[in-house]
């Protein structure tokens, strides 16, 4: 595809920077002829729906609306209306509609039916068998997913497990629905700050993400007394927030770890987050397979973020790429267990030559996931 001559729509929901925003940046950098970027906030984020109009890589205007309802179903209908309205304000026909999630892909399929766009890509960032607790609503969601897979020209899945999940859970045979392909989560490799090994905090462990029980941060805290016996200046930096935060803070107090644990809260400035990741020696990503039905199908962004900063990862084997990360010696699979955490942290942090090698491996491995490479190969 000659992007400089292309007319593309991206329709997505948003909370923080992710794959849709990376695609937007890539197309702008490529001086795309015409781009409509339509974005709606998730229900938990009562901000604005907006539409950017971009011509030859330059933003020429931005439309916004603050209209939102407290009822999620009402917002869905509002978003459908806004997406169609903003698109139809453009008089020309577009080459491609990239719909991120079933609702946005469904709109694109309708637009194609009225012959205003040539191709529709259904971009699946996440997939879970039980999206909603309401059975009727959950079945309807998966009916839309099936409809979009059947009617889109191409389906981008962030992991190989999504197509497998559709077949095993919903009966969408991969040999029949063969328009699916893997388009993984990426990083902007050259933008991420990396520090020389001599300048990092060699005894700092990092966690970034939602503070939920299933993320296993409490196990790290339980492991810390044993770690500190071997590494007295060990420090655990926690970036993020969530429903489990107060429980974790109480545990820190109970274990008298106040001098060894820092809760940094959510850091939305990407440069600041990159600096924090660059400072740390090692990262952790514990997923409880008994309570987490999301990560199994996903391509967790934070794993790629950790690796892009040169951080080796201690992780459970739930993510689809856990074994690949371990095989490339830029991470280590461990059980969801405090003793495994303490042993692995001590082993890596006390062997600086091994830690340095793992960090070099992380940087070498993640290069192939640069967003520019991913989008160039798939557009």
Image (cartoon, rainbow, N blue to C red):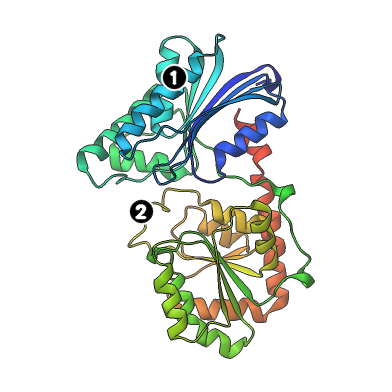
Q: Earlier in the sequence, mark 2 or mark 1?
A: 1
Q: Position of residue 76 (x, y in %)?
A: 35, 31
Task: For marks 2 and 1, give the CA distance.
Answer: 33 Å
Q: Is mark 1 on a helix, strand or loop?
A: helix
For disc 2, the neighbor class at 10 Å (few under 14, some 14 to 19, many from 20) is some
Which residue corresponds to mark 1? 84
Q: Position of residue 145 (x, y in %)?
A: 35, 32
Which is more foreground, mark 2 or mark 1? 1
Depth order, front residue of 89/185: 89
**Quarter of the N terminus within the rendering:** top right
**Quarter of the C terminus within the rendering:** top right
In this picture, residue 373 sits left or right of residue 336: right
The image shows residue 3, relative to residue 317, as above or below, that is: above
Quadrant of residue 302 within the rendered picture: bottom right
**Tag 2 near tag 1, CB within 8 Å:** no
Q: What element carries label 2?
A: loop
Which residue corresponds to mark 2? 293
Residue at the farthest front position: 66
In this picture, residue 313 sits left or right of residue 316: right
Q: Position of residue 19 (x, y in %)?
A: 56, 40
Can you see residue 176?
Answer: no
Residue at the image position 47 percent from the left and 52 percent from the top: 320
Depth order, front residue of 360/307: 307
Residue at the image position 73 percent from the left and 48 percent from the top: 191
């Amino acid at each position: 595809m000659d992007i400089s001559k292309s007319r593309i729509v991206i329709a997505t929901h948003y909370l923080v920077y992710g794959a849709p925003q990376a695609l937007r940046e890539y197309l702008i950098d490529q001086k795309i002829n015409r781009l409509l970027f339509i974005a709606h906030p998730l229900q938990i984020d009562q901000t604005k729906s907006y539409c950017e109009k971009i011509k030859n890589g330059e933003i020429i205007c931005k439309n916004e609306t603050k209209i939102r309802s407290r009822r999620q179903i009402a917002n869905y209908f509002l978003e459908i209306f806004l997406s169609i309205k903003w698109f139809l304000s453009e008089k020309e026909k577009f080459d491609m509609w990239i719909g991120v999630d079933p609702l946005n892909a469904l709109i694109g399929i309708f637009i194609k039916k009225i012959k205003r766009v040539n191709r529709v890509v259904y971009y699946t960032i996440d997939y879970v068998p039980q999206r909603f607790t309401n059975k009727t609503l959950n079945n309807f969601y998966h009916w839309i997913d099936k409809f979009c897979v059947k009617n889109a020209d191409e389906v981008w899945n962030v992991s190989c497990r999504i197509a497998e999940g559709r077949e095993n859970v919903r009966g969408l045979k991969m040999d029949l629905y063969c328009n699916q392909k893997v388009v993984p989560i990426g990083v902007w490799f050259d933008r991420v700050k990396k520090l020389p090994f001599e300048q990092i905090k060699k005894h700092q462990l990092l966690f970034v993400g939602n503070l939920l029980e299933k993320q296993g941060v409490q196990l790290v805290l339980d492991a810390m007394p044993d770690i500190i016996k071997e590494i007295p200046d060990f420090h655990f930096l926690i970036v993020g927030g969530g429903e489990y935060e107060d429980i974790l803070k109480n545990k820190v107090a109970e274990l008298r770890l106040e001098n060894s644990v820092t809760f940094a809260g959510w850091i939305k400035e990407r440069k600041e987050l990159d600096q924090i990741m660059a400072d740390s020696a090692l990262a952790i990503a514990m997923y409880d397979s008994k309570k987490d039905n999301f990560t199994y199908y996903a391509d967790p962004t934070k794993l790629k973020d950790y690796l892009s900063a040169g951080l080796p990862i201690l992780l459970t084997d739930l993510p689809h790429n856990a074994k690949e990360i371990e095989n490339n010696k830029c991470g280590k699979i461990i059980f969801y267990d405090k003793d495994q955490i303490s042993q692995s942290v001590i082993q890596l942090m006390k062997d600086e030559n091994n830690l340095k090698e793992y960090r070099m491996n992380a940087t070498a491995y993640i290069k192939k996931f640069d967003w520019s490479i991913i989008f160039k190969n798939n557009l």
